[in-house]
Image: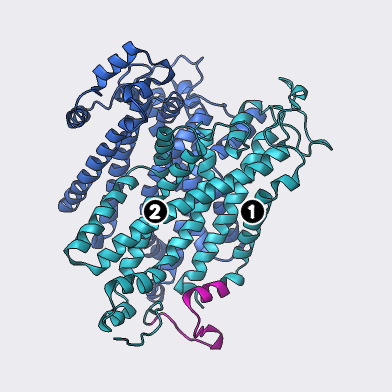
Chain colours: A blue, B cyan
Amino acid sequence: MLRFVVRRLLLLVPVLIGLSVLLFAWVRALPGDPARSLLGERATDAGVERINEVYGFDRPLVEQYVSYVGALLRGDFGTSIQTGRPVTESFIDYFPATIELAVTALLFAVVIGVPLGYLAARHQGRWLDTTVVTGSLLGVVTPVFFLAILLKLVFANWLGWLPTGLRQDPRIDATHVTNFYVLDGFLTQEWDAAFNAMAHLVLPAIALGTIPLAIIVRITRAAVADVLNEDYVRTAHAKGLAAATISRRHVLRNALLPVVTTIGLQAGLLLSGAVLTETVFSFNGIGSYLFTAITRRDYPVLQGFILFIALLYCLINLLVDVVYGLIDPRVRAA
Amino acid sequence: MSIPIPPAGPSTTPGASVALDDKDLEGGLSLWQGAFRRLRRSPTAWCGAVIVALFVVVAAAAPLLTSYQPGSTQWAGDVTTTEIPGPSADHWLGLDRYGSDLWTQLVYGARQSLLYGVISTVLGLAVGATLGALAGGFGAVGGRFGTVVDATIMRLVDIMLAVPSLLLAVSIAAMLGQSGTAVVIAIGAAQVPVFARLLRGSMLAQGKADYVLAANALGLRRSRIVMSHMLPNSMGPTIVQATLNLATAIIEVAALSYLGLGAPDPAIAEWGRMLVAAQDRFDDAARLAILPGVAIAITALGFTLFGEALRESLDPRTRR
């Protein structure tokens, strides 16, 4: 197992080196003088000089790359042109919000998706199956941002059941220890703050979780349907095992493999979907942070952000492979 | 030297077919002919095809479906901060917040989505399939050179896959600046790794097929085996993916304009930008947000249904 993890980690190295070269080239490939294009319309000679000093655009390319990688290794992902704030610092501030949102969304997708897919497979061709399949198809084709807008429109603007946006009502005087607002509420025992933060999570999590939900339903349904047709399931029935035992030990365990892979693959979707969802709900996570960076053409922030997300995405995929190896011994051997 | 060679066809998995009757024996039909025959019998394929056809007709015939110009704000005077005129005889779906005719904007928006969606997918397919065919072809042939070409291409693809596709598109679009070309290149480029990986995979799988072995034994040139035997037989999954990607591409075009990375020209109607503009007028005119969103979803549904049906009709397991 350890060898498997180490080999997968080593495979990441060339990918990350390549990505850092591309990202390094990215800002320098902008048309014209990099310092000027970074500053945009507000470029002044003094500003250009300052940027050149900070980023070293006037030094040889190799030297620039070496210092860029050196900074990355020290955890320095660049500094915002607009605010002068280190990107890493902003991440630490905004990231808990996105994790909170993504985890809630994924929970929503898995807790509803896996049982629903299982039930659909068990009742293939019946109305439950048809409804589930049609519903999941609609879930896949609805754009995240449109669903977010729709949910906000119906449940916040019209019905007024849930808040329209933000992470917590600003009128609530909450103490923030970890920046995970729900967790903070529980830690400090400020129950109203915790519940308020949870209410703010509901709509964004449903919006973000719907596409993963639809995909998980479809994969679970297909996987369970496949396993139900296997000889060993028939054998288990024939030797008189209880139906519940067969479902748990034979069907679910074997059907779980593709489902786990799918759940892992959704991580990328959640991260990019978060950019759109957070924008709709003014939810202050790294998604809105990226959106602001895009609108202001804050390239160092974009550069740092992409690398950070890629790193995270690769690690999640590695984690999925490890889980996969734990479930299926054949993967470890390969 | 010329030796007659048997027609290239997919290998049949041993033991895959059970209990054949006359109808099942699609003797003499090629992979695609058989798939087409199954496709014609699939209600899912018909649903998808009708939606796609409708979308194409609306996009092509936009000037005939409305008597107004897109982006024309000539009724801006009728729009107040509290009220946007709703449906009327002159304006079937009412006006939008800038005083343009909503129906006109929607119809011309279809044009934009089709254009950007199709061009970007074709671009992604062309580049991705070329890379995939090179990697798969050289990988299947083997040898030191072949392995190096395959590995180099696939490491490049791995790097692109390390960034989630929408974020890849966002970063490319942000780098190229606000323009239609930037959107097309960004969304096309984000699709490249998927196509490359898929085609390489199925080509490597074909490399072990009996007919490739046979062609090898007959002494055919490797380039000929790869180009006229392995490649045509490997394209199936890639074509299916391209159809499904059209749906994603149309959604991503809207997503990029939603994030402010679309074409900046306000005279061009675009569904994603219509959604953004509608957001702060929820309470008085929800239709401004709902209609473009529904248009995106229905179009994506059409391509998805058709793609799924195509996938099923090409899948040997459903050939019954």
Residue that numbered label 2 is attached to: B127
Give the camera-side residue of B192 and A291. Answer: B192
* Chain label for disc 2: B
Give the camera-side residue of B195 and B232. Answer: B232
From which residue to which does the magenta span run?
A: B15-38
Q: Quadrant of the N terminus of chain B?
A: bottom left
Instruction: Work out whether disc 1 and disc 2 sit on a shared chain.
Output: yes
Residue under the point 49% across and 16% down: A172
Question: Can residue B205 be found in the magenta stretch?
Answer: no
* Residue A117 position within the rendered picture, expressed as x and y whole percent measured from the top left: 49, 56
> In this view, which residue lies farthest toward the left?
A3
Q: Is residue B32 positioned above or below B72 on the image? A: below
Residue that numbered label 1 is attached to: B56
Residue under the point 78% across and 24% down: B78
> In this view, which residue lies farthest toward the front?
B1
Is A95 left or right of A129, judged from the image as shown?
left
Specify the amino acid type for callout 2. Val
Q: Is residue B195 positioned above or below A282 on the image? A: below
Residue under the point 31% across and 47% down: A317
Q: Is residue B156 positioned above or below B147 on the image? A: above
Mark 2 residue crowding within 10 angstroms, few (<14) / some (14–19) / many (20+): some
